[in-house]
Amino acid sequence: MTMDIELTVNGEHVRESVEPRMSLADFLRERLQLTGTHLGCEMGACGACLVLLGGKPVHACLVLAVQAAGETVETIEGLSESGAIADLQAAFHDRNALQCGFCTTGMMVNAHALLGDNPAPERAEIRDALSGNYCRCTGYEAIVDAIDATARKRASDVEAPA
Amino acid sequence: MTLQDTNTAAARAPHIGQAHRRQTARRHLAGRGRFVSDIVLPRMLHAAFVRSPMARGRIVEIDTRDAEQSPGVVRVFTARDLNPSCKPWTGTLDHFASMVSAPQNILAEEEVLWAGHPVAMVLARTRAEAEDACELVMLDIEEGEACVDGHAALSGDAPRAAPGLDSNLCFQTVLETMAVDAAFAGAAHVVEGDFTFGRHTAVTLEPRSVVADFDAASEQLTVHHGTQTPYQFQDIYARHFGLSESRVRVIAPDVGGSFGMKLHLYNEEMAAVAASLKLGRPVKFVADRLESFVSDIHARDHKVSARMALDAEGTILAMEVDDMTQIGAFSTYPRTSVAEGNQVVRLMGAPYRMPDYRGRLSVVFQNKVQTSQYRAVGHPIACAVTEALVDKAAARLGVDPFEIRARNVVPDDAYPFVSATGYSFEKLSHEACLAKLRDLMDYDALRAEQAALRERGIYRGIGIAPFVEITNPGAAFYGVGGARISAQDGAVVRLTPSGEVQCAISVTEQGQGTETIISQIVADQLGVAPEQVKVTTGDTDTTPSGGATWACRGAGIGGETALRAGRKLQGQILALAGQILQSDPADLALADGHVVDAQSGTRRMPLAEIGRIATYRPDTLPEAADNSLTAAEHFAPSGYPFDFTNGIQASLVEVDVETGIVRLLKHWVVEDCGRIINPLLVDEQIRGGVVQGLGPALFEECLYDETGQMTNASLADYLVPMACEMPDIVIGHVETPTNDTILGAKGVGEAGTAAAGVAALNAVNDALSPFKAEIRQTPMTPLRILAALGHV
């Protein structure tokens, strides 16, 4: 049995027929070839599969594709191509806040959502916010630094408009 | 660039030593990484495995009929179908004298030997359909008695962990100096302890992944394999499946973490290859996290009894150590499961002048997942035992932890030095590192703060731990034991017709920045910017053969290979330029993308012009001119068997003595990895390594029950260190280049992991010292700390 769903993914209208058991992560990766959404645990622990559903970060491995019907989904590919996270990407690059890159896309989605909710987080708040994103390579400090630097840069850009 | 600049050392090597960013990182930041788990090929099948639910048993029957009828299923294989196509593998090496291990093959034949042992393989159009069909395979296994505990497994009447074993002892060795008994007999102080180091596992964020693709028409096997060591697997697939090596191509694209775990041979990867050979279709296997926990190698699992003898002044006289390590039902292939314990007993007391030593190692089989080499092989265990005993001795003598170490480290002017365990150290810098750490952490102020807080019932602890790390291994590691694992690496560097540079090299990239440092090194040999050097790695068809990236050899050996290849190409370019310009090549140099006058720095011709003439107008060159503009170089380390590095770490913790919870407040590392090629990347290797040492010290443990079932085999139950639990890590450097190579670089990837855990252990014990409590088991869970405090 399959169900027809329609949704908007990275600004594009999508219509597909899916099994009810298909996760949103598998849907994005297998049907839409949006392989920037990664699967690390498939139980909502590691954060590698975070995407924005209706503007809020969710574990794409814990959401069924059919639950996303009628919704708006943004993945790392969409956030990257729209320029919404260009400064975060630059800060991660400058600070070498990634190594193997597998956790990185979920980390970016979460960091983007964090700075949307709290534009000036303390370091401890950044560390707390990232605690649903496992990283095995970096030890986290560079990631915290990169998010911290982005928040400061955004604040100073607002204070000193061109 | 001014004339003066051109003649400075920095101008000759302007990029080595600089914090260049990783260009490849930008793909990952845009979600454009290409991992094996992302690969989809036409007609590809997905594999899932039926695994043994019990640790030990005899297979009575496997009924696959219902599974074969399940929707989407193409084939179901058991041992009878797949194993005959594969020559069995045995995880022994000759230099570990008299070690034993049973032969292994793809799927369990008559007996299952650990909970998770693959028994049947289902191939279907989707992974979900393959998993559905696994549920329909009827498995009748008669449960047998499992060996779970290593000490019990060594008793004479214990059941054997695998068929054909005379005993459960895989390997035993004793190292000893002549006077060790006399040293203990004459010692003023003897400190001792029994230590337990739990099992943990790599938890790479990308699980193990493979896509095997056999094309019968061309007899070509291509394996997309998330591994550190593509050449090792090319050799294994060719030999074990009887294929021509040149028709086996292994490609390791982006690899989502490895840490030593992805260089071992696993049943599932062999099954994917065997199935693809049988079906002539691509076969994909990506471990899900639950199967990672019961099939990826585990690490450590040691029980150590140790004692240390000291004279009245606190000089270390000797250590005696007995390490029992438990490795599962088999020794892993092709590197064995003995290397870990072997390094444990050889690294004991490594920073110190300690003249005498006895180390006994027993490697024991049991019915659990195999253990084997993982980041910092053996180092954390040797370092923990040594440094915990040094702290005990300091407490016994009433000497500060810095002072007792200062009295005992091998002095910086005493090299070369041979340790009591037989390691030769070219040049280390313990004294400089001790002094630098003390300043970096403002030790005296921290002690004052600790004392003040203790008055208020806040228990902080400070722990320090010097370490020695093995890097740049030669053939002594594996090659001498008969393993077909390369100790050399190869690079091909060429100048393109447009005057840009390409370097294909055998060392591999898993995010540590291998490609970036290679581009920096090559750039400096050819007078170009690193961005103009395109580096290719991870493909046995397009890069020269070599050992790849493990045991901290990428920078030191791979970097030297690149340097020598770059210099060879430099010579070719200058010779050609000399002919074109009618100059003596010795008077020419390369800088800023040009052939320049070596003395004045004046530009003579751009590299693009060299490329153009050599490629499109070779007719204008003298008859014998070499216009290949391509240089190959292979390099194997000679001189010292290993280039040892050293450093020291410190941890500041706060222990809540009511709950047993440890908070990591700060961590410091002073490290000496020789010549630093890229400080940004070196520091991040250290930080990542530290956290992989702190994880198993406080959180990570593969827990088993008495029947051999792993009881926390999911990411909801197995504790991976999180951002909120980890401290900021302050890093300092001392640079002592090795003279074994031109580059002078040593490894750094394992330094952080080597000593972070014991720095934290010593810090916790320092915090607990007012209660006369002590912990000697990792991970230091709240319950174990409360037990040490006598609260539970």
Image (cartoon, rainbow, N blue to C red):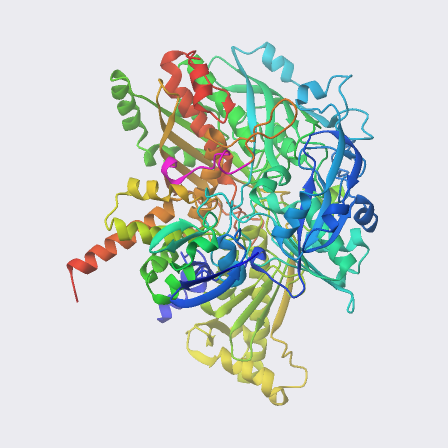
Going 39% across and 15% down the picture, which residue do you hit?
Answer: B769
| Residue B212 located within the stretch drawn in magenta | no
**Main secondary-structure element of the magenta-colored stretch:** loop
Q: Is residue B475 left or right of residue A160?
A: right
Query: In x, y percent, where is residue B150?
Result: 67, 23
Query: In x, y percent, where is residue B504?
Result: 60, 64
Taking B724 as reference, is B587 above or below it? below
Span shown in magenta? B714-727
Is residue B103 visible in the rendered image? The answer is no
Q: Please state, as top left, top right, bottom left or bottom right, where the N terminus of chain B lies in the image.
A: bottom left
Going 59% across and 13% down the picture, which residue do you hit?
Answer: B184
Q: Please state, as top left, top right, bottom left or bottom right, where the C terminus of chain B lies in the image.
A: top left
The image quadrant that residue B481 belongs to is top right
Count all numbered tags in the image, as a single digit. 0
Nearer-the-camera pick, B763 or B521: B763
Query: In x, y percent, where is residue B628?
Result: 63, 76
Is residue B480 visible in the rendered image? The answer is yes
The image quadrant that residue B216 belongs to is bottom right
Query: In x, y percent, where is residue B592?
Result: 43, 72
Nearer-the-camera pick, B256 or B397: B256
Taking B16 as reference, is B118 above or below it? above
| Residue B726 located within the stretch drawn in magenta | yes
Q: Is residue B20 left or right of residue B696?
A: left
